[in-house]
Image (cartoon, rainbow, N blue to C red):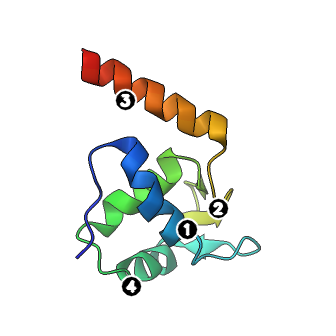
């Protein structure tokens, strides 16, 4: 069973693998998104769905509960921001 690490940078490998199962030219219902995520044998599919939105892999229409792919990978700059944020928290 797959669990997301606490470290945001370490989460990216798992999130990247999952987002690649979605097509960029399709909008998905929440049920469809959940089913695809569940196919990875994850312990908390709702957390993973939220993290895909939080890290901007997915865009979401909250009124219609539709999701679509924004990107399959985060840019180097976005990853550096995550790393800096993690270091600040760690040093706190």
The location of residue 40, given as percent across then percent down, is 37, 80
- Which dot, 2 or 4, sits closer to the camera? 2
Distance of mark 4 from mark 3, alpha carbons?
A: 29 Å
Among numbered discs 2 and 3, the one appearing first in the sequence: 2
Q: Is residue 31 above or below residue 66?
A: below
Distance of mark 1 from mark 4, alpha carbons?
A: 12 Å
Q: Say few, some or many: other residues with alpha carbon within 10 Å of mark 2 (under 14 / 14 to 19 / 20 or more).
A: some
Front residue of this view, candidates 32 and 7: 7
Query: In the rendering, which numbered label is found on residue 83?
Result: none
Q: Say which element carries label 4.
A: loop
Query: In the rendering, which numbered label is found on residue 72?
Result: 2
- Which dot, 3 or 1, sits closer to the camera? 3
Among numbered discs 2 and 4, the one appearing first in the sequence: 4
**Residue shown at 72% from the left, 70% from the top:** 24
Q: Looking at the figure, which quarter contains the C terminus? A: top left
Q: Say few, some or many: other residues with alpha carbon within 10 Å of mark 3 (under 14 / 14 to 19 / 20 or more).
A: some
Distance of mark 2 from mark 3, alpha carbons?
A: 22 Å
Query: In the rendering, which numbered label is found on residue 39?
Result: 4
Q: Are marks 2 and 4 in contact (CB under 8 Å)?
A: no
Query: In the rendering, which numbered label is found on residue 86?
Result: 3
Residue where numbered disc 1 is placed: 19
Front residue of this view, candidates 58 and 84: 84
Distance of mark 1 from mark 2, alpha carbons?
A: 6 Å
The location of residue 71, given as percent across then percent down, is 68, 57
Q: Say which element carries label 1.
A: helix
Q: Are marks 1 and 2 in contact (CB under 8 Å)?
A: yes
């Amino acid at each position: 069973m797959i669990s997301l690490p606490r470290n945001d940078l370490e989460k990216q490998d798992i999130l990247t693998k999952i987002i690649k199962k979605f097509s960029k030219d399709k909008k998905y219902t929440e049920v469809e998104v959940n089913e695809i995520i569940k196919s990875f044998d994850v312990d908390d599919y709702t957390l993973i769905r939220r993290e895909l939105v939080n890290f901007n892999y997915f865009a979401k229409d909250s009124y219609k509960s539709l999701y679509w792919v924004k990107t399959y990978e985060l840019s180097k700059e976005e990853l550096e921001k995550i790393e800096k944020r993690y270091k600040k928290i760690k040093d706190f």
